[in-house]
Image (cartoon, rainbow, N blue to C red):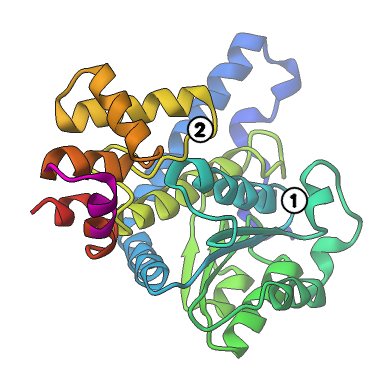
């Protein structure tokens, strides 16, 4: 493992245990600032990945994240947050973590070392050739991720690898390898730090821009937001106000008539339709407001 960037000692933090709190926080912040700049260099490659995920998602394919430890948890997190943000179902964006859901809060011995475990996890969700499997591993060599990518390739599913080292092993098993080398961690080998930040930023990009391409965004507003709590309910009403340029009470009335479907409420107002007609108009335009109101 000595050749891995993620395992090397960071020269700037050799004396981390002797620094003042202010000094330690400063160097940590300085190191974190490097992460976004590293990702900037990969934007053309990420654009290809997002083009793929958008294309497949719009054809009924799923986005499936796979990882172990921090990498797996970040995939599960991104998948879970797509549900309230973009009103996806839990089956459209999936996060698989080595060891299963129990591994979200505790280490599961040996789970990340099992290629067979990854294959079984993908078989259990009936992976198809329409799906995109995104393997995430800071080290770039996690067997669970390699096993998942190998199986995905064997059934002609689409594959992406995200590693935080160059010449990563998992890159050899993916059609679209992404290698973001953020350099040695502040705390040697602790890839929940800069590596985890890089992975989180990349997953944010993939899921968000994919959902833009799926028509779940109007301007920069999340028009497919699922109102699972009071905050999101209020946000939906505010979005209707913003798009339609109306007051809060009228927006709420529309929202209620649309049975809390934000898109339907907007099309009702902008096209002067009832809820059923607005819903039909949206459906015939792939759920895209700007197409429906032309």
Q: Which comes sooner in the sequence, label 1 or label 2? A: 2
Q: Main secondary structure of the magenta part?
A: helix
Does residue 265 belong to the magenta stretch? no
Specify whether residue 288 is in view: no
Residue 8 screen position, x and y as percent: 67, 48
Specify whether residue 83 is in view: yes
52 sits to left or right of 9: left
Magenta part of the protein: which range? 272-280
Residue in the image at 68% along x and 53% along y: 72
Q: CA distance from mark 1 to mark 2?
A: 20 Å
Residue 96 screen position, x and y as percent: 68, 60
* Residue that mark 2 sits on: 32
Q: Nearer the viewer, residue 96 or 234?
A: 234
- Residue 173 in the image: above or below residue 89: below
SS class, disc 2: helix
Disc 2 crowd, CA 10 A, few/some/many (<14, 14-19, 20+)? some
- Which image quadrant for residue 219? top left
* Residue that mark 1 sits on: 69
Identify the image quadrant of the C terminus.
Answer: bottom left
């Amino acid at each position: 493992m000595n050749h891995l960037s993620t395992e090397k000692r960071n020269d700037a933090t050799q004396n981390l245990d002797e620094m003042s709190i202010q000094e330690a926080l400063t160097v940590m912040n300085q190191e974190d600032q490097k992460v976004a700049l590293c990702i900037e260099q990969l934007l053309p490659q990420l654009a290809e990945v997002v083009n793929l995920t958008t294309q497949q998602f719009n054809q009924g394919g799923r986005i499936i994240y796979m990882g172990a430890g921090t990498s797996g948890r970040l995939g599960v997190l991104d998948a879970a947050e797509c549900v309230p943000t973009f009103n996806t179902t839990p089956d459209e964006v999936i996060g698989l973590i080595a060891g299963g859901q129990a591994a979200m809060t505790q280490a599961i011995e040996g789970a990340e070392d099992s290629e067979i475990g990854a294959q079984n996890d993908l078989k259990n969700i009936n992976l198809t050739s329409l799906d995109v499997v995104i393997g995430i591993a800071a080290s770039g060599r996690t067997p669970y991720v390699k096993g998942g990518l190998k199986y995905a390739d064997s059934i002609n599913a689409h594959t992406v690898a995200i590693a935080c080292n160059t010449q990563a092993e998992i890159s050899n098993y993916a059609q679209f390898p992404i290698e973001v080398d953020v350099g040695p961690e502040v705390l040697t080998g602790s890839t929940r730090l800069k590596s985890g930040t890089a992975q989180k930023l990349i997953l944010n990009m993939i899921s968000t821009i994919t959902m833009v391409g799926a028509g779940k965004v109007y301007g920069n507003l999340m028009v497919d937001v699922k109102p699972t709590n009071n905050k999101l309910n209020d946000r939906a009403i505010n979005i209707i106000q913003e798009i339609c340029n109306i007051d809060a009470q009228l927006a709420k009335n529309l929202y209620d008539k649309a049975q809390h479907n934000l898109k339907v409420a907007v099309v009702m107002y902008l096209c002067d339709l009832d809820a059923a007609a607005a819903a039909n108009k949206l459906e015939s335009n792939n759920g895209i407001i700007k197409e429906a109101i032309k």
